[in-house]
Image (spheres, rainbow, N blue to C red):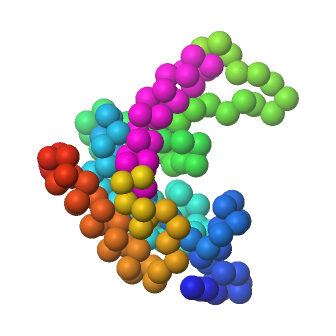
């Protein structure tokens, strides 16, 4: 379903994936278990834009400051704040130090486990793979999938 934005571009078209779609943010436990899914946002929106829209950036930065509990993220959240930990980018025309390379290995290793949350939702519920429904229905399907997954594995919070 096309959704023209202010400049006429289709908000649901993802240039990255070359398909219409939506962006659903997922929060997971450190062992890769999904505990929250956001309402769907247009597919062309960047992850940080979606997270900011849902109040996640401020909330997770506050949690990190108050509880000393940072959030592990991918490079899509670069510059989101001090409460986020992501791999270091290689500087233009330079190389990462050995310490930065080690840091990246640790972060990516832990982050890989957390990506399991997305995988669990998409592989368990085929309805979340290639969805072309109204965005409000996608939101309901994602929320229902989260609840069903938690009940199936007795992992309710």
Q: Position of residue 48 (x, y in %)?
A: 52, 57
Q: Is residue 103 magenta?
A: yes
Residue 133: x %, y % from top left: 47, 80
Q: Residue at x 30, y 62 (%)?
A: 145
Q: Position of residue 146 (x, y in %)?
A: 28, 58
Query: Which residues lie in the magenta part?
Result: 100-122
Residue 49, placed above or below residue 136: above
Quadrant of residue 71 within the rendered picture: top left
Give the residue displayed 58% in from the left and 49% down from the top: 76
Residue for point 34% across, 45% down: 28
- Residue under the image location 19 percent in, 46 percent down: 153
What secondary structure prevails in the magenta region? helix
Query: Does the image show residue 79?
Result: no
Q: Does residue 8 sit above or below 145 in this rendering?
A: below
Name the quadrant of the N terminus. Answer: bottom right
Is residue 40 at all visible to an observer of this figure? yes
Snapshot quadrant of residue 58:
bottom left
Q: Nearer the viewer, residue 60 or 137?
A: 137
Who is closer to the viewer here, 151 or 157? 151
87 relative to 51, above or below = above
């Amino acid at each position: 379903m096309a959704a023209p934005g202010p400049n006429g571009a289709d908000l649901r078209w993802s240039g990255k994936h070359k398909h219409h779609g939506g962006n659903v943010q997922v929060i997971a436990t450190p062992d890769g278990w999904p505990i929250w899914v956001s309402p769907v946002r247009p597919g062309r929106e960047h992850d940080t834009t979606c997270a900011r829209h849902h109040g996640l950036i401020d909330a997770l930065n506050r949690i990190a400051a108050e509880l000393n509990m940072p959030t592990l993220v991918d490079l899509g959240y670069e510059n989101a704040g001090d409460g986020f930990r992501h791999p270091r980018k290689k500087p233009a025309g330079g190389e990462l130090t050995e310490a930065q390379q080690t840091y990246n290995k640790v972060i990516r290793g832990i982050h890989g486990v957390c990506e399991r949350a997305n995988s669990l939702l998409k592989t368990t519920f085929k309805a979340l793979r290639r969805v072309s429904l109204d965005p409000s229905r996608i939101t309901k399907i994602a929320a229902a999938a989260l609840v069903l997954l938690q009940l199936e594995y007795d992992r309710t919070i």
